[in-house]
Image: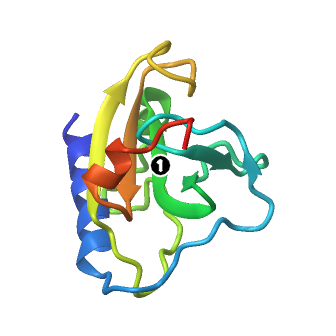
Amino acid sequence: MKKVFALVAVVVVVLVGGIACGAKVTVPEGYEQASPVVPAMGEHWIDPEDPTAPIYLVYEGEVIGLEVVWTEDMLAEVPSPPGETIKALLAIPVGAVVDHVDVGWMTPGIHEGPPVDHWEMHIYFISQEEKAAINPEG
């Protein structure tokens, strides 16, 4: 459990601490839409070649956030000695603005996603009010 919180804390500091303002985040080539608009999240775009790659959250053609998932199995494979990379994240363009980060524990059936218990970290480039307004009807 301590590993998860330490990992999340480091990721948040790196992402939020090193980001200025203005740049747009775009979906990488090769990603495919995996879901329609999910309320308060947007469409999910995935890398079909790498199920552990970050998921891009898109609404009305704009990337509004990123989702990173860790399962218990992934965390059980934490490298030793300490200090080695557990999971490398993508590079967010210099100038992109991170508004807020949500971290949650999910179990199967809460929503479409891994069929096992897992941690999710959502990194949003929009406000919580804008996120709350996202719905499938547009």
Q: Nearer the viewer, residue 61 or 19?
A: 61
Residue at the front extreme? 137
Q: Residue at x 26, y 43 (%)?
A: 3
Callout 1 amino acid: Glu
Q: Secondary structure at mark 1?
A: strand
Q: Give x and y (percent) for residue 95.
A: 40, 87
Q: Which of the colour schemes (rainbow, by chain, secondary structure, one colour) is used?
A: rainbow
Q: Nearer the viewer, residue 100 or 131?
A: 131
Q: Residue at x 33, y 43 (%)?
A: 132
Q: Nearer the viewer, residue 69 or 1?
A: 69
Q: Residue at x 37, y 44 (%)?
A: 133
Q: Give x and y (percent) for residue 105.
A: 32, 28
Q: Is residue 88 visible?
A: no
Q: Nearer the viewer, residue 122 or 80?
A: 122
In the rendered structure, the answer to whether residue 9 lies left or right of residue 58 reads left
In the rendered structure, the answer to whether residue 34 lies left or right of residue 107 reads right
Say which quadrant the C terminus sits in: top right
Q: Give x and y (percent) for residue 89.
A: 49, 63
How many numbered marks appear?
A: 1
Q: Residue at x 22, y 33 (%)?
A: 1
Q: Residues within 10 Å of mark 1 (few under 14, many from 20)?
A: many
Q: Is residue 22 above or below residue 117?
A: below
Q: Give x and y (percent) for residue 87.
A: 48, 55
In the rendered structure, the answer to whether residue 72 lies left or right of residue 14 reads right
Label 1 belongs to which residue? 67
Q: Is residue 56 above or below residue 16?
A: above
Q: Is residue 5 visible?
A: yes
Residue at the top extreme? 109
Quarter where residue 27 is shown: bottom right
